[in-house]
Amino acid sequence: MMCAKCARPFTSGSILSALDKKWHPECFVCTICKRTLADQSFHVKNDDPFCANCWKENFQPRCATCSKIIDPSEQYMTYNDRAYHKNCFTCAACHQSLAGKQFCIKDNGYYCPEHKLKYKDFKIILHFK
């Protein structure tokens, strides 16, 4: 039996089983930072293991407004393939939250219905659920 990473045989010592493969504990590492994943929770993408920190930094969605990572426990919204914290998705004029409300788009800015009446030539009026 050979290690999935280094292809060396197992002699004495521990054998780690993960991803339907066998590994030397020192060979089962995060794809990005190379820290050991033995005895840690990990995430998998395309059969590659990632530690929690690297997963968070590289694969968790980031808010299009504040650029901060959106925690998996947080509720967030998406529009036009961009993620937003609910408190960050706001009217460009009055900064009132647009979460769950009707909004309008003008020049890549989002506006509440009240400001739609003040500005003309809105391209789209949407209701965001």
Image (tube, rainbow, N blue to C red):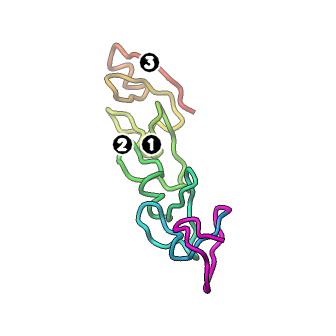
Badge 3 is on which residue? Answer: 124
Q: Which residues are magenta?
A: 1-20
Badge 2 is on which residue? Answer: 65
Label 1, secondary structure: give it.
Answer: strand
Image quadrant in which the N terminus is located: bottom right
Residue 112's spot in the image, x, y percent?
42, 29
Query: What's the residue at 65%, 64% (across, down)?
Result: 21
Between 43 and 10, the residue placed more toward the observer is 10
Q: Is residue 32 above or below residue 107?
A: below
Label 3, secondary structure: give it.
Answer: strand
Label 2, secondary structure: give it.
Answer: loop
Image quadrant in which the C terminus is located: top right
Badge 1 is on which residue? Answer: 84
Q: CA distance from mark 3 to mark 2?
A: 20 Å
Residue 110's spot in the image, x, y percent?
38, 29
Q: Are marks 1 and 2 in contact (CB under 8 Å)?
A: yes
Q: Is residue 103 in the magenta section?
A: no
Q: CA distance from mark 1 to mark 2?
A: 7 Å
Amino acid type of the residue that numbered disc 3 sits on in the rendered structure:
Ile
Which callout, 3 or 2, points at the residue further toward the start of the chain?
2
Between 70 and 47, the residue placed more toward the observer is 47
